[in-house]
């Protein structure tokens, strides 16, 4: 089984290629919002191809996201296992902000946000996750074309005078804040 057989929404393979190139073997990556693992499996497979045995922490509420009424944690595990990347991914059933507390400042090579696209959630996630990324790492996320995401990301980068890079893939935009 390969990533493209997993249902989901994944329009940032170019950005994930960049992350896979940047990460060093043994480093830690966080993905917030793996859903059923389409994007997660893509990244893990890339890392495996490059023989970089990094760990991906896949953080999600795993509960009630369309079309699932209940938990989809077991479905994610099954997909990771069938794609032979279970050993590279640590799924964590937790809210994004709370999960940030599990990591030390500067501990992560990259953090990718693909969860709730509301202004408040993106703003809080930026504050929680930015300092967890090491110097030379990447904080990024999907959905810059969504006005609430754009506002949160632009406010955050202008307030802290950070560089904001945009990645266009088809009609979709992702944002990247190099650390
Ligand atoms: C658009 S889907 C992600 C799609 C996925 N990256 C893919 O490849 O198909 C958004 C995910 O974010 C999760 N999510 C929403 N709010 C969250 C929160 N506060 N903390 C963690 N995950 C959250 C949802 O449960 C859902 O699985």
Image: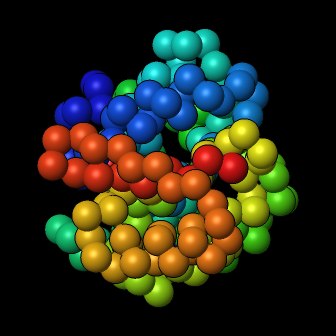
Across and down, in percent, residue 159 comes to 62, 77
In percent of the image, x 20 and y 34: which residue is there?
5
Q: Where in the figure is residue 156, as x and y percent of width and height?
A: 57, 74
The residue sitting at 29% across, 26% down in the picture is 2
x and y, in percent, of residue 166 in the image: 39, 49
Quarter residue 167 falls in: top left
Give percent across and percent down for residue 114: 41, 60
Q: How many marks?
A: 0
Does residue 110 appear in this view?
Answer: yes
Front position in the image: 44 or 174? 174
Quick check: 154 above or below 23?
below
Taking depth in this image into account, of 149 and 108 the one nearest to the observer is 149
Task: Tell me which corner region of the image, top left, top right, bottom left or bottom right, holds residue 150.
Answer: bottom left
| In-front residue for pair 55/143 | 143
Drawn side of residue 164 relative to residue 167, left or right: right
Q: Is residue 6 visible?
A: no
- Frontmost residue, 89 versus 164: 164
Q: Quadrant of the N terminus?
A: top left
Residue 107, compared with residue 19, is above or below; it is below
Q: Quadrant of ligand 1?
A: bottom left
Query: Residue at 67% across / 71% down in the picture?
Result: 160
- Colour scheme of the picture: rainbow
Residue 89 vertical placement versus 126 (above, below) = above
Q: Residue 106, relative to residue 152: is it above or below?
A: above
At horizontal 22% and vertical 33% (from top left) the residue drawn is 4
């Amino acid at each position: 089984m390969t990533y493209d057989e997993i249902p989901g929404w994944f329009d940032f393979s170019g950005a994930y290629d960049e992350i896979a190139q940047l990460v060093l073997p043994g480093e830690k990556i966080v993905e917030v919002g793996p859903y059923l693992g389409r994007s997660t499996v893509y990244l893990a497979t890339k890392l495996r191809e490059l023989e970089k045995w990094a760990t991906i922490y896949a953080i999600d509420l795993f509960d009630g996201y369309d079309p699932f009424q209940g938990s989809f944690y077991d479905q994610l595990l099954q997909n990771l296992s069938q794609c032979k990347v279970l050993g590279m991914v640590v799924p964590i059933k937790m809210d994004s902000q709370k999960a940030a507390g599990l990591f030390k400042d500067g501990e992560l090579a990259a953090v990718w946000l693909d969860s709730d696209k509301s202004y408040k959630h993106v703003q809080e996630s930026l504050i929680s996750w930015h300092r967890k990324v090491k110097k030379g790492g990447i904080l990024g996320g999907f959905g810059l074309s969504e006005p609430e995401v754009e506002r949160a990301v632009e406010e955050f980068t202008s307030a802290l005078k950070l560089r904001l890079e945009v990645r266009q893939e088809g009609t979709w935009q992702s944002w990247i804040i190099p650390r």
